[in-house]
Image (cartoon, rainbow, N blue to C red):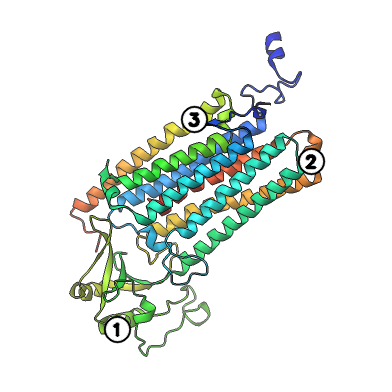
Amino acid sequence: MEVTAKASTEEGLEWEGGNKPFNASYGKLMMWFFIVSDALTFTGFLVAYGFSRFKNINSWPIADEVFTHFPFLHGIDAPMYYVALMTFVLIFSSVTMVLAVDAGHHMQKAKVTFYMLLTVIGGAIFVGSQAWEWKNFIKGEYGALETKGGQILQFVNTDTGKRAAIQEFAQGIDSPRTTHQLSNGIWYKSESSLPTVSLAEVNKGFAASSNLVIRTEQLDEKGRKVVLSRAESLVKIQDATIVVEGANLIRNEYGNRLFADFFFFITGFHGFHVFSGVVINIIIFFNVIVGTYERRGHYEMVEKVGLYWHFVDLVWVFVFTFFYLV
Amino acid sequence: MAAEEHKLAIFRGLLKFKSNQQKIWGVLIFLSVVTTIEVALGIIKPEILSGSFLRMKILNWIFIILTIVKAYYIAWDFMHIRDEKSGLKNAIVLPLVILIPYLAFILLIEADYIFDVMETGFVAWNF
């Protein structure tokens, strides 16, 4: 008994966290265990994504074609630049965080404050960027048709070789139809906002313009989407049952339905982590300003929050790879 | 306090820094370079790397390996695992290193099997 009592670092506190077998405090240890379990949660999500993708390996959407937007560059095809920028922002905010931790070890209050502020700003930029990314994803760009079996049919202009937007080639027909509302129809049936063009209008526009062909979900051996001939397209378009614009949890214009579901779920879960990280960082930031840790004699709280923040960065590195690169 | 004495060498001692701050900036530069390589490869998609290895594109293997390299440096230098005792290091890293590849392995094999069944089966699911 005496041996163990002497081995404890702080006398008389071995049952109150005074004993540090790993040379790490109770709080830090628990943060680490939380991170391990959270890492396994994200593993579950990403592996489930991999499962769905391998299951549909010959028809999965190509990420480069989905995420092509960059702020203020309208209509310019910029695959991945924006998400790469987001990655740099998050890595940089991770660096300012670790600098804050380092300054905390040297009890430099002003430096900790400054670096914590930079970290909060970096995190806020990242969350904002993700919101913008979501907005573009939800809004969609070209629109598509969906068949009875849930396949997405996209359109390509053979003259330019580029994607054709259904809103542009659809030809208006005289059939006014408004969004069904609870107040003026069957009360238990509702619908979300109507697509800007109807199926009949797309069909008419497609039949009229002979330079349009259908691009299917299927991938060829080189990993490119299979484009049908004009004759095949005219047959295929008869399978279409609904117009799809943008993405939601039920269907999306980019391809497989699961793609949008996983995108929303995984980046949403990660974004929520970033958001709570920013909130926690703000709390710690104010604690630093009012001198809580100066009085406590150490800045270990900054270190613990730092661990969480780095973990969020770590997860993003994987999300970035599996959603945008692979 | 363990955190006071940082191990300042990275790349197995190839690169030694004078202070912890310097090491942080050094790691940032390294991570930025790796990310830039990843993005460049992702945009160019070189034809040479589109071959297949273990039923996955070589390019995708490169992405995954570079990601793990990045994860290593974030955990080791930003989260200071390098400075922790080996007991804590193992308690954190081993469960992840064992469980994650295991889960990925069984689920991806299963998904590949389901793909084969749907591809060669008699039921039309792609109508």
Q: Disc 3 on helix, strand or loop?
A: loop
Q: Disc 2 on helix, strand or loop?
A: helix
- Across the whole image, how many numbered discs are drawn on residues? 3
Q: In the rendered view, would you say A29 is above or below A228?
A: above
Instruction: Kindly identify the amino acid type of the residue bearing the numbered disc 1.
Output: Lys
Q: Nearer the viewer, residue B8 or B4?
A: B8
Answer left or right for A110 relative to B67: right
The quarter of the picture where residue A22 lies is top right
Which tag is nearer the camera, tag 2 or tag 3?
3
- Nearest to N terminus: mark 1 or mark 2: 1
Q: Which chain carries label 2?
A: A
Q: Mark 3 lies on which chain?
A: B
Q: Residues within 10 Å of mark 2 (few under 14, many from 20)?
A: some
Q: Mark 1 lies on which chain?
A: A
Residue at the image point whose x is 47% and y is 75% from the top: A193
Q: Are marks 1 and 2 in contact (CB under 8 Å)?
A: no
Instruction: Kindly identify the amino acid type of the residue bearing the numbered disc 2.
Output: Thr
Instruction: Kindly identify the amino acid type of the residue bearing the numbered disc 3.
Output: Leu
> Pointer 2: what residue?
A292
Q: Which of A23 and A93 is in front in this view?
A: A93
Q: Which residue ends up furthest to the top in the rendered image?
A: A2
> Pointer 3: what residue?
B14
Which tag is nearer the camera, tag 1 or tag 2?
2
Residue at the image point whose x is 45% and y is 42% from the top: A43
> Pointer 1: what residue?
A204
Q: Disc 1 on helix, strand or loop?
A: helix
Residue at the image point whose x is 33% and y is 54% from the top: B45
Residue A82, percent from left and from top? 49, 59
